[in-house]
Amino acid sequence: VQLQASGGGSVQPGGSLRLSCAVPRSIGSFSALAWYRQAPGKQRELVASIVGGGITNYADSVKGRFTISRDKSGRTSYLQMNSLMPEDTAVYYCRASQGYRIVWGQGTLVTVSS
């Protein structure tokens, strides 16, 4: 079972997108939700994470532009991406973790181009 990610697409530089990721009830609950991305020819990197009551962490490259959040149930995470730049182009993956348990989403493509 995978997480269900959605919201990717194509946008011009300076535009915005919001990604969503749902954790199916069938796989239990997770304290940490995160978004990673992988650009062509590059390693997968952490973009943002949210744990517990709402402690967030961001990659330096997205600070001030991206915001991670989760709904009240803790089962859906959101990544609001503003002021998008061409270098944000990548496949974005959501991840849920709880101790040794890690589950990934299928990836959603974000393309920033004029």
Image (cartoon, grey):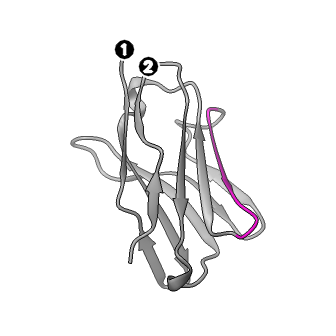
Discs 1, 2 touching: Cβ within 8 Å: yes
Using the rendered view, name the quadrant where residue 16 is placed: top right
Looking at the rendered image, the quarter that the N terminus falls into is bottom left
> What percent of the width, then of the height, locates residue 82?
59, 30
Q: For the residue carrying disc 1, how many other residues have a C-alpha within 10 Å: few (<14), some (14-19), or many (20+)?
A: few
Inspect the image, locate mark 2, and give the three-letter code of the amino acid beneath it: Gln
Q: Earlier in the sequence, mark 1 or mark 2?
A: 2
Magenta segment: 65-73
Vertical order, 26 against 36 (above or below): below
| Frontmost residue, 76 versus 40 | 76
Looking at the rendered image, the quarter that the C terminus falls into is top left
Residue at 24% x, 41% y is 40
Inspect the image, locate mark 1, and give the three-letter code of the amino acid beneath it: Ser
Residue indicated by mark 1? 114
How far is mark 1 from mark 2, CA to CA?
A: 5 Å
Vertical order, 38 against 98 (above or below): above
Is 71 within the magenta? yes
Residue indicated by mark 2? 12
Q: For the residue carrying disc 2, how many other residues have a C-alpha within 10 Å: few (<14), some (14-19), or many (20+)?
A: some
